[in-house]
Amino acid sequence: MEYGFVDCHCHISAREFEEDLEDVIQRTREAGVKTLVAVTEEAREFDRVLQLQERYPDLVAPCFGIHPLQGGEGPTQRSVKPQELDAALPQFFKHRERLVAIGEIGLDFTPWCAPTQQDRDGQMDVFIKQLNIAKELDLPVNVHSRSAAKVVIATMREQGVSRALLHNFAGKPAVALEGVKAGFLFSFPPAVCRNQQRDKLIKQIPLEHICLETDSPALGLDKHVRNEPCNIVLSCRYIADVKGLSSQTVQLITAQNARRLFPKVDAHLQYTCF
Ligand SMILES: [Zn+2]
């Protein structure tokens, strides 16, 4: 049985894929991945993700978003500033027809990335503005939360957001279940296979609220090796094992969930059995 995978959160426009993109895409297709929901972190990536959609129209489904952390990886990483979103705003509206979601957006209150109240306020401002763009454009959101699970869920509920994917969620199960109640979905990358830390969470979230993702090029099985969309099979198998289900069931239900959450992706997908 072949239902195909939907990678609900990956960074295919990242520099890490520039050199051998054709090979990466080939492995993606060979693994049975039918759609890449391609998130962005900053405005300078927007053109690239649109170009990739033109190059692989049956595969790449673009999202625009300004990430809560800017300035690259490592010690240069810092909280986003409201003016960084302001500069990108016209782009969201100009390309609205082509977007399947707004993301990657969210909150990251890791102490060294958001040391001051001003940092956290700036992130919140940018997050809420993008939630409102999503509502205005009638799009779902693709959301990052780190050290901020509770506040992310509460903020989305306050803002009346009902269609959301919480990617690589690592909050407490009780907090996740608040999100389930609000109708949110949760996706898990291959990094969950590194240890059993997320088992309790995966067990408690109903399968109807789970999607698959890779977050490529990050969050692979091995921290130091570039992750690729073809590794989605690892998340699928792991979730199946934790839940005591078959991989086929997890593949089918998560693909259906993704279709429900990102209805504009549907046009790209060529499901063989639905
Ligand atoms: Zn990401």
Image (cartoon, rainbow, N blue to C red):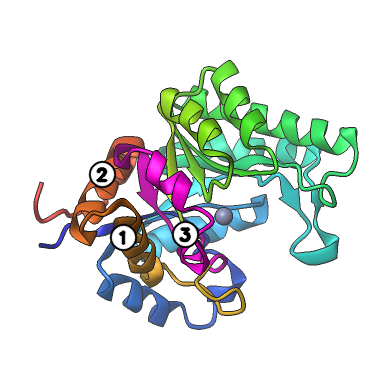
User: Which residue lies under the disc numbered 1?
Assistant: 241
Q: Which amino acid does label 3 sit on?
A: Pro
Distance between the alpha carbons at the discs numbered 3 and 2: 22 Å
Distance between the alpha carbons at the discs numbered 1 and 3: 15 Å
Left or right: 2 as drawn, with respect to 52: left
216 magenta-colored: yes
Q: Where is residue 246 in the image (x, y as percent from the top left)?
A: 20, 58
Q: Where is residue 63 in the image (x, y as percent from the top left)?
A: 49, 47
Q: Do the residues labelled 1 and 3 touch (CB within 8 Å)?
A: no
Kindly state the secondary structure of the residue where label 2 is placed.
helix
Q: In this view, does 119 lie above or below 155?
A: below
What is the number of callouts on the image?
3
Q: Is mark 1 within 8 Å of ligand 1?
A: no
Q: Does the residue labelled 3 lie within 8 Å of ligand 1?
A: no
Q: In this view, does 171 lie above or below 174?
A: below
Q: Which amino acid does label 1 sit on?
A: Asp
Q: Nearer the viewer, residue 253 or 203?
A: 203
251 magenta-colored: no
Bounds of the magenta segment: 190-219
Q: Where is residue 224 in the image (x, y as percent from the top left)?
A: 61, 78
Which image quarter has ligand 1? Answer: bottom right
User: Which residue lies under the disc numbered 3?
Assistant: 189
Residue in the picture at 52% in, 65% down: 195
Q: Nearer the viewer, residue 24 or 148?
A: 148
Q: Earlier in the sequence, mark 1 or mark 3?
A: 3
User: Which residue lies under the disc numbered 2?
Assistant: 266
